[in-house]
Amino acid sequence: MPDPLSLLRHVFGYRSFRPGQEPLVTALLEGRDALGVMPTGAGKSLCYQIPALAREGVTLVVSPLISLMKDQVDALRESGVAAEALHSALPEGEWPRILRRLRTESPCLLYVAPERLETPFFLQVLESLWVNLFVVDEAHCVSQWGHDFRPSYLRIPEALARLSHRPPLGAFTATATPEVREDIVLRLGLRDPLVLSTGFDRPNLSFRVERPRDKKAFLRDFLGPRGSRSGIVYCATRKAVEEVCAFLRDRGVGAVRYHAGLEDEEREANQEAFVRDRAPVMVATNAFGMGIDKSDVRFVVHYNMPLSLDGYYQEAGRAGRDGERSECLLLYAPGDVATARFLVGQAEGEEARRQGFRKLQAMVDYCHTPRCLRGTLLRYFGDRDVPERCGNCGSCDDGTELRDATLETKMVLSCVYRMGERAGGRRFSPALLTKVLKGGLDREVRSLGFQELSTWGLLRDMPREGIRDLVDTLAAEGYLALSDDDRPVATFTPRAWTFLKGQDRVLLPRRVPRSRAEGFWTPREEAAEDLFETLRALRRRIAEEQGVPPYVVFPDSTLRALC
Ligand code: ADP
Ligand code: MG
Ligand code: ZN
């Protein structure tokens, strides 16, 4: 049996293995199942191609995209490796030739689309092949919690069962949270697999979230200095793709479009133009990108917020596969959240919707967090020992100014507390909370009995979007919990109690231009008075809970100091 290192050198022409490759190769060679979780561009293909060459027989690779398969097969053939692909775009007449080759040539790699696994004919063919290694690429497609669920991936165990003996099973993905990882192991039926994750950090990518008033103008200004460098602009809908692409073309940017509503011909031509550097900017829905082999994408802009961090990181990760510095920018507007909630609410099944809303909340939190964005992403994907600051993201950039938001935070939390008291445990949305803080007095406010609280208008002088942003930021920071459904409700968290009782200060990034920030918000006297009352009520409650007199909890003077 040829050894892996000599295959790496002589067949693929590389000097040494990259991190994670060797243990995965060894596991599969020794007949052990394996799950490899490595970022895009890390080199997952070699992890199964080398074992495929070192073992006799056929290696079956399930791969979700035709373009992906074609690229791989072409590259393998160029290296002199026998490889075939079976998918719907293949003329029927080709089948006999391919089958003959599979039965006579060894080793040989066979790439198949997951849908093939559902056809009785193919399952019969499988029974007659000597499959010695079974590979599932983009394995997160098997999980409903992932962002690219493909139902036909669920047929994989059935296909495996058709084989005369069960070969080792290798699964590979770039994006997998711990729960998606468990789901992959469970649904594919991996047996005592080697699970290897190289960590998710992509140090050459910088991350930034911006909330421009005019996204189009912002995008134009962003693209200007980047000239002819390649980049992708992801939009949430086909309509947005059309608008943004037309807008950029009108302003002389060489942009092309891509979405599922276009004719195949145009899609292919546009993709080709982008990959061959004839068009620097690709404006697309998330239908574009998987399997696109372009390593010098210098920026990925999300014009709308995606539905999950899984999807976001996968798409943003298409930047900088060559290891050069590249930018990932997300343009956030609170309106994106409503659209996203609507989309998640369309999912089949209650559990799927609940998970969807939970993932969406993590995405919204990312847009609001004052913390290191890279750290937020990496922790979400289960990386441990993530540094507090990475020095290469919007939050870590020295330019980000923090402002003391302790008082506003107390206002918001005390309002939540009061509303909870008044409403007798009834639930209320961040939108309603915002309205009451702003001092709105409409029918909803009156019917729920909040008019008195609203008359105070605790944050009356702050712009409404500013209040809503603050509420969302406090949720991202864990002071408020937003429930996992399409009508989120805000509730108190233990952290909010601790904060109200303590002397901690809250620092949040200043998100308004400096000129407007000066004198941005000054508390009114009566607002401070109201806060004092709230804290006294809070103290009574704590005292009751602990069975001690209120002054033991803390004296009036402390409360005054807090206000
Ligand atoms: P992934 O599937 O993890 O996104 P690929 O398998 O497509 O990544 O590999 C990305 C690129 O890295 C390819 O161009 C591949 O040839 C290259 N590559 C893989 N392994 C090595 C290695 N050990 N040394 C140098 N280049 C490698
Ligand atoms: Mg790959
Ligand atoms: Zn950072």
Image (cartoon, helix red, strand yellow):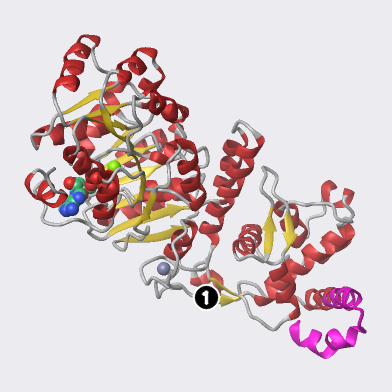
Question: Magenta span: helix, strand or loop, mainly?
Answer: helix
Along the viewing direction, whichever of 357 and 245 lies nearer the viewer: 357
Q: Which residue is mark 1?
A: 402
Report x, y in % for residue 270.
Answer: 25, 31
Which quadrant of the structure image shows residue 415? bottom right
Residue 557 highlighted magenta (yes or no): yes
Q: Is residue 296 visible?
A: yes
Amino acid bearing label 1: Leu
Along the viewing direction, whichever of 142 and 372 lies nearer the viewer: 142
Along the viewing direction, whichever of 192 and 513 lies nearer the viewer: 192
Report x, y in % for residue 320.
Answer: 26, 54
Residues shaded magenta:
535-563
Q: Furthest-top residue in view?
A: 93
Q: Residue at x 28, y 54 (%)?
A: 23
Q: Is 243 left or right of 531, judged from the image as shown?
A: left
Number of numbered callouts drawn: 1
